[in-house]
Image: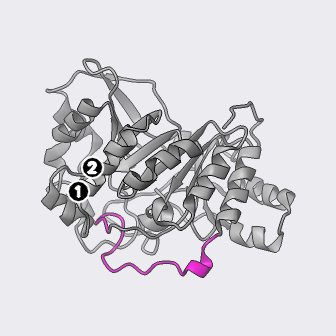
Amino acid sequence: MEATSTPNKLIDRFGRTISYIRLSVTDRCDLRCVYCMPEKMTFVPRTQLLTLEEMEAIGRTFVRLGVDRIRITGGEPLVRRNILQLFENLGALEGLRDLTLTTNATQLTKYAPELKAAGVTRINVSLDTLRADRFRAMTRVGDLERTLDGIEAALACGFDKIKLNAVVLKNHNHDEILDLVRYCIERGLDISFIEEMPLGQNDHHDRAVAYYSSDQILEDLQPHFDLVPSTYKTGGPTRYYQLSEHGSTRVGFISPHSHNFCDTCNRVRLTAEGRLLLCLGQEHSMDLRHVVRANPGDDAALEQAIIEAMQIKPRGHDFNLNSQEILLRHMNLTGG
């Protein structure tokens, strides 16, 4: 991976420069987290998914247009067959300066060394609880020790940074905020606390009742830690605080409800079936699978389609905890 200065051609109609794409390589996962998908999820037929070669072509085109950050997401990316091929090919792209993986860590004991060798710079691990019984309840099928072992395997490989992502739900795990921060301090990890996003029908819990705001989390932490606002950015929407007495650990907040981050949005998402989503919380999109298959090997056609898509990127989302306005697209279909 070589960092070069590439003129960015992706500017939306609100003047925002798009420098970051999240590529979902699968909607499948070996867990069933209660805020992500139903227990009995109907997955996209494999025949409708982009091939790894098509994903690489799209990623390469985005980098050529000025994007310098790619995050590989799912579902769980590491359950996709031959996925290391995609990491290796994207990691070698000139102009890409950050290749990140979002994972539940269940496969990291197997894949961490190869991911490091392929050019992955950072890993984000979804972990909402440190209690085995709660982990099983929140993931429906998960084994906490397998995820913790995966984190340790990643730490041993020396990635630039490993961060935990914790979705906080009132009366589910909100009382573990301090424990999660202390776990990160002990290992030199960062952590982001996330307000649940209202994507897809949810029959497990009432989102309005389970809502626990970033402001409340910050209030819970302040008696125990000296949190100093930080200018540190990783390309996403997280607002970071430095723990002044623990120099290597930062605490971040992703706050789609309490602190809308749409004005500075610099990212788009590609679903596993090739739909380019211009907004996390809207349905504005372009079918890039159709473009690549209708124009095989035609980089110019793909470039033009991506540039044109920037003009339908909306100003922002309309998340509402008291409605279910996006009933069909669960988080595993959206890409983390």
Q: Contact (CB < 8 A) between labels 2 and 1?
A: yes
What predominant SS class does the magenta segment belong to?
A: loop
Q: Residue at x 78, y 35 (%)?
A: 7
Residue occupying the point 23% across, 36% down: 181
Say what amino acid the circle numbered 1 marks.
Answer: Leu
Eyeballing the image, is 233 above or below 208? above
Front in this rendered view, residue 260 or 133: 133
Residue interval drawn in magenta: 32-50
- Please give left or right for residue 321 compared with residue 1 in the image: left
| Residue ID for mark 2 | 148
* Local SS, label 1: helix
What residue is shown with label 1?
A: 144
| Residue 154 in view | yes
Image position, residue 148 (x, y; %): 27, 49
**Residue sitting nearer the eye, 180 or 231:** 180
**According to the image, what is the colour scheme of the structure?**
one colour
Left or right of 22 in this view: 96: right
Q: Provide residue 295's location: percent of width, then percent of height.
A: 83, 69
Residue 245 in percent (x, y) is at: 25, 18
Could you say which quadrant of the image residue 55 lies in? Answer: bottom right
Residue drawn where x is 26% and y is 52% of the image: 128
Camera-nearest residue between 32 and 114: 114
Instruction: Determine if the magenta segment contains residue 37.
Output: yes
Does residue 314 show up magenta in the picture?
Answer: no
Quadrant the N terminus occupies: top right
Residue 307 versus residue 122 in the image, above or below: below
Q: SS of the residue at dot 2?
A: helix
Local packing at callout 2 (Cα closer than 10 Å; few below 14, some 14-19, many 20+) is some
